[in-house]
Image: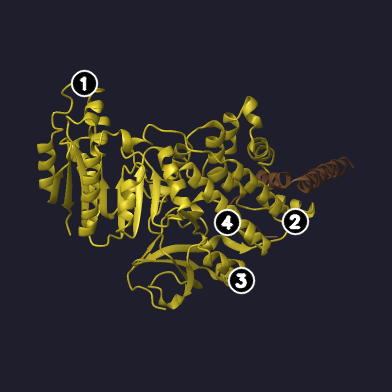
Amino acid sequence: MIDLAYLDAGSGSLIVQAVVGGAAGVVVATKLYWRRLVARFRRQRTDQS
Amino acid sequence: MSISESPTRVEPASFRDPGNQVFYAGSEVLRGLDPRAAEQWRALAATDFFPALLAEGKVCGTEPVDPSRVPAGVTWAAVLRHERIPFVSHPYEWSFSMLRDAALLHLEILRTALAADFTTKDGSAYNLQWRGAAPVFIDVGSFEPLRDGEPWAGYRQFCQTLLYPLLLTAHLGLDFRPWLRAQVDGIEPDQMRRLFTGPRRLHRGVPTHVHLHGAMQARNARSSTTDVRAQLRAAGYTRELSLATVRGVERLVRRLDRAPAASPWADYQRTCGYSGADRVAKERFVELALTTAGSPRLVLDLGANDGRYARIAACHADYVVAVEQDPDVVDTLYRTLRTEHDRRILPLVMDLADPSPGGGWRGVERAGFGARARADVVLALAVVHHLALGRNVPLPAVLDWLLDAVAPGGRLVVEFVHPDDPMARRLLDNKPDGLFPDYRREAFEALLAARCRVERRQDLPSGTRTLYQVAVGG
């Protein structure tokens, strides 16, 4: 996916919008962080094996 | 449709989005679009919401013109012609309520666009200008179709140039203008976090938009926005969430309302030492000067106070810019004009002894006040003594600056307050004796005579003030 935006939206500024959006947004942000955690864990296990 | 044959001049502020560029041909404001932006324009023009925003005057007038008729230069896939904004101003010249209304209009436009599967590429305070006391969204090139699952790219910019300045004034009573004037990209979350410590952390909007925002930026500094967009999309971010965020920010901005404080200048008309006869004579003088000037296109009222003379000017001119130093006086004037649905008087906050300099890239991206101030009539009523006696600006320099703001063939209406006037004496009491030996009526008249032609002169009944109507060049 090519990033077509001319403006640097700021990675943190994109995520915080989910949280500001209310309960459903918090779920999205939590999911994002959970997936990041799982991905890191998987990477570590792959590295070890 | 024909376009002026005059050579084009690129708008110095129009370079951040390479997809489109604003330029001028004669008196016309044009926007060139590259193939992708042209495609987006066609999609935008075909929506229901965009023509509705145009009809309501919330977006500046825009119509397509034949690109082949644009004077030689870069070839664009499409060219738009915009309505000309009568006087370009910057957010650091607006009062609190003006900045708040500008923010609310930006959010309303974004919310309307989102509902129609469009968004704005950015969220800058510089996307807005004014028609009198009504804000107008000028960055038509900012609209683009929404890519589902993506948050608003302009949120950070909106915080930095609109929301944070409002929070500073609403919660801390700090003047937001010096921050915006000094930093073209606005106030950084980290700067805000240092100002909102202790119990201030809990002020409305601060925990999320300032502290959490700043912390998220720090934690995600190494993640690319492309990756984060993909992660958010995968985690289920939707347009509805974007809408909920925008509605939340709108609610917050609405609650940041703040009534202007009482100011010593707010009651100036009553306490300035004028007699009723003085006021009547002065109003007549100003009125006659404006009549003599024909139908001036633009009048600058420098030191406008409560806008009394700006209102007189608005009866004779197309547009009046009322410049006043006191933010609360300007805010009061703006709020009154807003209730009257005024479209011809633009109130601005500015210290005349420290007018807005050029800002941004190479100091020309945001034009300084001197580069923008070229009016058919300039009113400088009860202002010369403040600059000359209050701020020690040499009298010839004061006069040269005022005359610079007059277009060739235009007129200056200037009031000279004699050194024995009670208001002048009040200023002189704060300075050592004999500091301004040249501050005399005869010296002022000699300076006028050397620079322009005095058409009319009148002493006010109090005998300590004189008005001059002078013709400038042309």
How many angstroms separate mark 3 from mark 2 (CA)? 21 Å
Chain bearing tag 3 is B
Of tags 4 and 2, which is closer to the observer?
2
Which residue is tagged 4?
Answer: A6
Whether residue A29 is situated above or below residue B38 in the rendered picture: above
Foreground of the two, B451 or B182: B451
Could you tell me residue B81's position as x and y percent? Answer: 45, 69
Q: Is residue B441 visible?
A: yes
**Which mark is drawn over residue B43?**
3
Could you tell me residue B460's position as x and y percent? Answer: 17, 41
Q: How is the image coloured?
A: by chain
The 10 Å Cα crowd at callout 4, few under 14, some 14 to 19, many 20 or more, is few
Which residue is tagged 2?
Answer: B238
Which residue is tagged 1?
Answer: B432
Residue B1 vs residue B258: left or right?
left
Q: Quadrant of residue B443?
A: top left
Letter of the chain in brown: A
Look at label 1 and name its amino acid: Pro
How many angstroms separate mark 4 from mark 2 (CA)? 21 Å
Could you tell me residue B355's position as x and y percent? Answer: 34, 42
How many angstroms separate mark 2 from mark 1 (CA)? 68 Å
Q: Quadrant of residue B205?
A: top right
The 10 Å Cα crowd at callout 1, few under 14, some 14 to 19, many 20 or more, is few
